[in-house]
Image: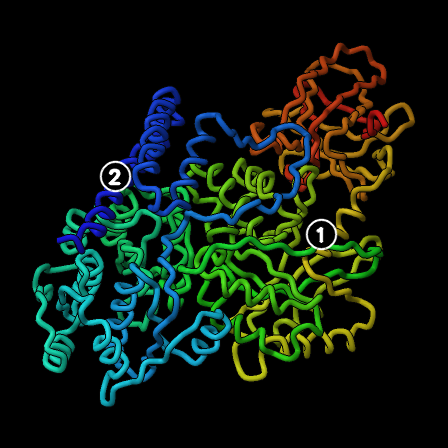
Amino acid sequence: MLALLPCARGEVADDKYIHIYALIEEGDALSSSQPTQALVKYHEAQTALEKFHKAYPDWNSQVVNFRLNYLASKLGIEPIVVPTTTAPETPAATPASPVGGLFPKMPAAPKAYVVNCQQDSRDALKTAWALQGLINRRSAEVYIISNSLHREQLEDGGKPFELLTRLTGDDAGLRTLFQKCQWRVKKMFVYDVEKDWTWYLALMAAAQQDGIPVTESLKNALTSEFGWKGEVEDFRDRWANRIEAYDWALAKLMPACSKQVVFALRSDRQLPLVDYAVASKGFVFWLDFYDEYEKAEVKKIFQTKGYGVGTSLMGYGSGGDEANATANRYGIGYVVSDLYANGSFWSSFPNKTYTQALGRAVAAQPGKIYAHVMWSDGDNIQFDQNALYHFWHDPARGSVPVATELSPTLQELNPPLLDWYYSRMTDNDELVAGPTGVQFIYIRDFKDELFPAWCRLNRTWCAGAGFHSARIWLAPNPSVKYSTYMKSCGLAGMLGEGRALKSGFPPKIDTWGASNEEQLFEHLAAMEPNPQAPVFCGFTCIVAGFDKRDGGYSAIKRQVDRVEAAYPGRYVFLLPKDQFATIEAYYYSDARQIAGRPGGDDGLAPVSAGDGEFTVVERDGEHCWLVPKHTPPHYFYLKVTGTFRPQPGKALEIELEYFDAGSGEIVMDYDSTDIQATLGGAYKKHPYTIHRTNKAQWQQARFRVNDAGFGGSQNGHADFRFTNGGDDLLIRAVRVRRVGP
């Protein structure tokens, strides 16, 4: 009886924490519509969580601390506010202590017992991984070798280990592990390999009842050989179809499932992530995201109380894109991890914090292309553990600057792997965050009211990993979410989805994907230099296309050498962090004024857009722009063409020379750093309005702004515009000048 008390106490603690988490979720749900009631829920949750921590001081302190900090920010004790003025967002500082609390952690063991399951059948391997997760939940002492890299990575991790002597015969790995640990198994759940839903429910039920999922033949073999005498439950004919099965699981199993993680696993593949799914007690499913009937069941799962910002969908959904879009609408991020192995073992290592050196600027010159090359798919931690790990053994690494995408979640899921990358970096390596930072999300699809909280989480985790850059994904610009992400990320720069330079935001560089080395050369050769200005760009090598013999870094080096031979002096290859430092040095010049007038571009030029047509006419012997009368009103757009950019925290004055004829208002909208303004700041309306009085003479009007961004976020990539709200409007000149020192 006494031996059961710790387990029972742990289950009580889990139940109490789930109740507290539900209060937090209720507060989140009320925050936008009923903020006062939301504060009541947050305060109730905070009080309960503080009492919980005193009662259960050993219960996952990282999770508790994370939630306490979250509640403090909601209650205004330690508010984290995204600035809406011109004050620059400083790069995120490396956290004083390691970040954590997103993922279930397993207790560390003094040494590991290693079993080689490479020759086991698929069904036996799945059961072995489930048994590994069951054991490692209490002490992470089992490590399974299922591919050629696993032994080397175990040795890299530095933990003492003992290789178990394998039995002979079929499925020797599973049988060896079961022989050693069968006393841990209280129950077997029999599933039908032809009905995949029986496997998932057997897996979850086994995780909650100290059991393992087995086929009928495996059950017979294990009980016969080892004399195991536990309980057996048959799941093979319990449910007619997936929907019926998952409805039952939602009612009977979901309440005891972790709300930090949820898993989409395909049963007909060898998925080593099974061990972490069992150890974490996450909900596990396989449903078709493109089938409306089954997708409705997915939504039932994601709507479960407790899921939200910080929850990770792990594995790989039936439709990767649709799985991400669906999960994001419920505040769930994607941590792609279908072939990630030994997760329950690696999670037992203590979380760590990392740093990288800042970027260094070079003197950029017109007529040259400053490019980075980067590996793709680092958001998928199985690529971090497998293909990218393999690439980093290539002797050609270090001969050319190449960035590697990795997942910031490795700080908690696999610190030894992140240690390994950092310990082997050369001066030509940089580690950057894969899409979209701490989790792969579609910014466009992520739940609006939860997005700022996700951005704060992202900033902390990217900083903790030491990353200065990240790949952005599906972030429509301009939009509130784009501006929120860019303003709050704390990074030196962003990669992908076009080029953007905006005061107060990190610079963004476009990148072209290459699925193989020949396509990499084609993209490199197609990029044209600009004799008037330096060109900044990037090339992303798709890991799967380079994961072959003599591929990896050797393939990149061949194509870089080839393009340099074909186009001598065209390219300067840099790491992303050095590109961003170079951009900051080149574009943010000290010029005091820029101006534009018909026939003359001194750093400012008009833009012709669909709602902003104009012509050049002559008035009193002078050329001027004519913005015709139109219903609805038309606009006159302008953009900065040179290196002039607003300086964060400094004022600008925009001067308009117009002919006061007829009647009508003139209003200015400018691309600002004010996230609360229209489309995330892209069209902030200046409070000063010009009222024409038909004086038939040239007039000057000045608009002072303190939060100009000028990131080309308006139509036609313009930086500001004037609205013609009346008769034909004539404009002779426009100037932008800095105000003050």
Could you tell me how far apart the alpha carbons at marks 1 and 2 are, in whole angstroms?
47 Å
Q: Which residue is mark 2?
A: 16
Q: Amino acid at mark 1?
A: Phe
Q: Residue 696: where, in percent of width, then height? A: 83, 13
- How dense is the environment of label 2, judged by Cα within 10 Å: few (below 14), some, or many (20 and up)? some
Quadrant of residue 242 within the rendered picture: bottom left
Nearer the camera: disc 1 or disc 2? 2
Q: Which residue is mark 1?
A: 580
685 versus 416 height, above or below:
above
Q: Nearer the viewer, residue 227 or 660?
A: 227
Which quadrant of the figure contains the C terminus?
top right
Q: Amino acid at mark 2?
A: Lys
Q: Residue 85: where, in percent of width, then height? A: 65, 28
Left or right, 76 with respect to 26, comes to: right
337 versus 300 height, above or below:
below
Q: Nearer the viewer, residue 691 or 395?
A: 395
Q: Nearer the viewer, residue 603 or 185?
A: 185
Quadrant of residue 412 within the rendered picture: bottom left
- How dense is the environment of label 1, judged by Cα within 10 Å: few (below 14), some, or many (20 and up)? many
From where the camera sits, is residue 103 visible?
A: yes
